[in-house]
Amino acid sequence: MKAAYECILLGAGSGKRVGKSINKILLPLGKKPLYMQALTVFLEDEACRKIIFVIRSEDKELIESDLTEWAVANEKVELVVGGLERQDSVRNGLSKVSATIQYVVVHDAARPFIDRNSVEALKLKMVETGAVTLGVPVKDTIKIVKEGLVVRTCYRPEVWQIQTPQAFKKEWLQRAFAKAEKDRFLANEEGELLERAGYPLAVIKGTDQNFKVTTVNDYVIAKGMYNEFEKENK
């Protein structure tokens, strides 16, 4: 039997860097809002017992309407209002995870092209190691720069661009959050919190398609990719 988990789906961001006045996850991909792509992947996974969808309070009514319109299994989706920072939003979601659940998966709703094969690989590694993230090796040379000057050049074969989903033992993630709160530390993402708490974090290779829609260019690419997928599957 595959390990059960609950998914914290993060959608409490904004559309500022996309150049839109609305939350970027509400932008359309085809006929549906962008977030519906990732949501559907976890809805269709039997091992996912619940999706804790972390959103902005001002988007709640519209998202509730979307879920009804597209006949989403509302009993599997719980809407939770996020916080000012990503870490606050994940903490709010984590507080809603069921007591009996051992594993938690965190994913950005703004990464619409997460595929089922990647999720399956992530789940296997999750059980094996306790904490795992998707990522892809960087293609460009990465340099550390301070005050306009190069401090050092990173060894490219060791540098990865980290993605979501990330999967953790719930207890490890809770402890990592507790340490961060005690230290008043704000991380870039949840894997960093696990590192600081001394837990091993595995990385498995994701796909280039699993990018986060952050800028105008990202959204243009996402629309193009979606249209191509639709043509191929007709």
Image (cartoon, grey):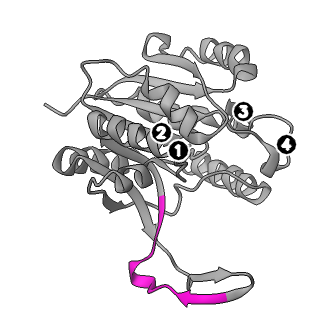
State if disc 2 and disc 1 touch (CB < 8 Å).
yes
The residue indicated by pointer 4 is: 20
At 55% from the left edge and 53% from the top edge, which residue is drawn? 188
Residue sitting at x 70%, y 31%: 31
Kindly report the distance in space between the C-alpha atoms of the residues bearing marks 2 and 3: 31 Å
Tell me the quadrant of the picture where the C terminus can be found: top right
Sequence-first disc among 4 and 3: 4
Which of discs 2 and 3 lies nearer the camera? The answer is 2
Q: Which residue is mark 1?
A: 184
Mark 1 vs 3, N-terminal side? 3
CA gap, disc 4 to disc 2? 33 Å
Q: Return the x and y of residue 85 as percentages of the image width and height.
A: 63, 40
Q: Local crowd at mark 3 within 10 Å, few (<14), some, or many (≥20)?
A: many
| Residue 97 image point, x, y percent | 38, 22
- Which mark is first along the chain, 1 or 4? 4
Report x, y in % for residue 228: 62, 53
